[in-house]
């Protein structure tokens, strides 16, 4: 099981001091937090994508690439990458590149985004959000699996004989999680491809999250990727801890009461009851997190939001220390206890390479000498069988392209 | 015996409230008329005053606390809605509109609605037709022709000199009962998690589904 943190990259005033950090300060703080996540033994650091103040993370791959260079074991992910407003071709290129520079430690979580105006900023129509997400991901999926792609759809220019470069590391695409708060179609999309499903969880009651994941599991099995119990599930959550429960409550309350995402709404007590937010001792966080399993089953990835709402860097690093020293070691042990042997771990690059190649050497895409013509002779790579890649790629193949174009 | 689900939403702010009183009379007549036709009614009443904090929290956070969720589920699964609000400053009460705002935009489709409103003077009575009716029309609900407005004077013997309040209540209730009798709406409530459009359809019908 993977444990980690995710950040939404908000720059928020600290309500206890009235001070708002600069972008520069908050960006540096986040890099420090990411590195410390590895130091305390966490597995994953994930970063959101936003294109408007008060958020700073508009360029996740640049940020994650730097963190990759400063760490050695940390899995780097997004939370979420906008599959709606980003060009799927550019996503295929950027994340394949991140995969190479991180040595296979990159995955990505796709989402549709939560800021309406972001659509027109990138020339998209929010009313088409779901169809765009579905079409764009189908293209992204193919670009990583087929050396040469012919494609035509509704939402971007057609591609003729296009090769997305670099090819994924070892010819194994980054693992994809589909993140959603409330859209059953996204659970279906994740299940359809046999990808992971990440339930954001943090603003919703357990009953809702349970239904989303039950749907994903049921459809994962339906689409033939394994049993429902073997589907790859991730959960969000948010915590604030001090050794003594009451200290945590007292210290976090002004942050909760004023945070843009919670503030001036329900009481912290009501909110903690209705959502996964846990404010208390490490033991309370352990108990609460173990309880998630009761309604979603054995799952593969738990990410916590710990650096939001204006909390100062020092406090966030202390939260990481508590997670690393007191919470995660216990959770690793406890979650492992009753876990059925056939429930897989979260896929990593190593496990995906092993699944694809067994003991054989992974393919390393190597371009042919420049022919000036990539259209007529199959793959532009000298070590790939012409056509074979396309046939083993998407389950739709060229027929899907035609239909998509005709819609 | 057939059973129809009626939901009453009253957004009066005081206790006791003349808005709630009007709602009770509307449902009483409607239930009586349906009973005569061999149809039982199951009635759920929601006073928005009790849900006011939950409604605000939903507006701020995007999810409904359990008590409010129960009300939203009931409205979405109803065969008929009786919606009654006081008129403030020529329109529905803000609390009433806030409740409408947190309802899923598709949840009221085909829903028969009987609109009631209360106010200080009969001069506010048109607010039903220029403010409240368009709201339900926009949401593809079916508001019945007669909206029942009760001014302060209506509760005594004066009234507006056209038709007595009990007459108007009965007329609105009859139009409503006629629609409720025919609708099979509560039988058709679909579970969003049942995914009537699985992936094969989403991608163009190519997955054999």
Image (cartoon, coloured by chain):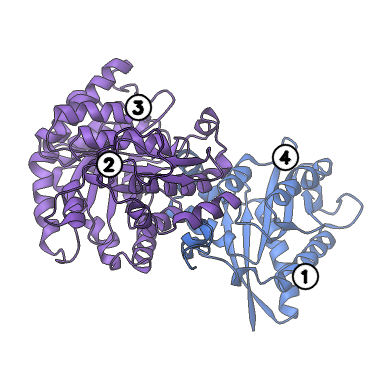
Chain colours: A purple, B blue
Gap between marks 2 and 1, in whole Å? Answer: 64 Å
| Dot in front, 4 or 3 | 3
Q: Earlier in the sequence, mark 4 or mark 1?
A: 4
- Res A38 quadrant in image: top left
B12 vs A94, nearest the viewer? A94
Residue pointed to by mark 1: B178
Q: Chain of mark 4?
A: B
Placement of the N terminus of chain B among the 4 image quadrants: bottom right
Residue pointed to by mark 4: B91
Identify the secondary structure beneath mark 2: loop
Residue pointed to by mark 3: A59
**Where A39 falls versus A300 (above or below)?**
above
- Res A324 quadrant in image: top left
| Dot in front, 2 or 1 | 2
**Where A104 falls versus A310 (above or below)?**
below
Residue A307: x %, y % from top left: 26, 31
Q: Chain of mark 1?
A: B
Residue pointed to by mark 2: A168
Residue A323: x %, y % from top left: 14, 40
């Amino acid at each position: 099981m993977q444990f980690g943190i995710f950040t939404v990259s908000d720059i928020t005033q600290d309500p206890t001091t009235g001070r708002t950090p600069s972008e520069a300060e908050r960006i540096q703080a986040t890099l420090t937090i990411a590195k410390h996540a590895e130091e305390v033994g966490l597995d994953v650091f994930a970063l959101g994508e936003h294109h408007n103040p008060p958020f700073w993370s508009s360029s996740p791959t640049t940020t994650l690439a730097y963190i990759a260079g400063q760490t050695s074991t940390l899995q780097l992910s997004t939370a979420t990458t906008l599959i709606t407003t980003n060009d799927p071709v550019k996503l295929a290129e950027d994340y394949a590149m991140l995969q190479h520079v991180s040595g296979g430690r990159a995955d990505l979580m796709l989402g549709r985004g939560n800021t309406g105006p972001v659509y027109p900023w990138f020339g998209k129509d929010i009313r088409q959000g779901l169809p765009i997400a579905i079409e764009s991901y189908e293209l992204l999926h193919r670009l990583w699996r087929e050396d040469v792609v012919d494609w035509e759809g509704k939402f971007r220019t057609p591609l003729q004989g296009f090769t997305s470069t670099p090819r994924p590391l070892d010819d194994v695409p980054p693992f994809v999680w589909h993140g959603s708060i409330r859209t059953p179609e996204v659970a279906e999309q994740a299940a359809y491809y046999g990808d992971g499903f990440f339930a954001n969880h943090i603003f919703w009651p357990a009953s809702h999250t349970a239904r989303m994941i039950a749907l994903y599991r049921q459809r994962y099995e339906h689409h033939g990727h394994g049993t429902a119990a073997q589907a790859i599930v991730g959960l969000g959550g948010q915590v604030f801890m001090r050794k003594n429960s009451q200290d945590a409550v007292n210290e976090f309350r002004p942050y909760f009461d004023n945070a843009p995402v919670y503030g001036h709404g329900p009481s912290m007590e009501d909110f903690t009851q209705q959502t996964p937010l846990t404010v208390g001792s490490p033991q309370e966080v352990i108990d609460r997190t173990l309880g998630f399993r009761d309604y979603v089953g054995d799952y593969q990835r738990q990410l916590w939001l710990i650096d939001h709402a204006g909390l100062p860097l020092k406090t966030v690093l202390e939260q990481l220390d508590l997670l690393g020293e007191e919470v995660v070691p216990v959770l690793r042990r406890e979650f492992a206890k009753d876990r059925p042997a056939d429930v897989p771990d979260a896929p990593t690059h190593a496990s995906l390479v092993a699944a694809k190649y067994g003991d054989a050497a992974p393919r390393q895409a190597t371009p042919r000498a420049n022919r000036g013509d990539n259209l007529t002779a199959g793959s532009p790579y000298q070590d790939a069988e012409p056509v074979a890649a396309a046939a083993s790629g998407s389950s739709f193949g060229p027929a899907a392209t035609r239909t998509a174009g005709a819609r | 015996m057939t059973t129809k689900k009626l939901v009453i939403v009253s957004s009066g702010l005081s206790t006791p409230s003349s808005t709630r009183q009007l709602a009770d009379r509307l449902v009483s007549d409607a239930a009586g008329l349906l009973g005569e036709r061999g149809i039982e009614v199951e009635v759920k009443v929601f006073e928005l005053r009790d849900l006011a904090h939950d409604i605000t929290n939903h507006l701020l956070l995007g999810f409904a606390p359990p008590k409010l969720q129960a009300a939203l589920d009931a409205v979405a699964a109803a065969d008929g809605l009786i919606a009654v609000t006081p008129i403030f400053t020529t329109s529905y009460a803000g609390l009433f509109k806030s409740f409408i705002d947190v309802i899923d935009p598709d949840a009221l489709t085909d829903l028969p609605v009987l609109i009631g409103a209360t106010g200080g003077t009969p001069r506010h009575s048109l607010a039903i037709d220029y403010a409240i009716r368009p709201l339900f029309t926009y949401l593809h609900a079916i508001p019945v022709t007669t909206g029942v407005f009760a001014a302060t004077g209506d509760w005594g013997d004066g009234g507006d000199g056209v038709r007595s309040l009990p007459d108007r209540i009965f007329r609105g209730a009859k139009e409503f009962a006629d629609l409720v009798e025919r609708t099979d709406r509560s039988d058709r409530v679909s579970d969003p998690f049942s995914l009537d459009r699985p992936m094969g359809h989403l991608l163009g019908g190519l997955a054999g589904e």
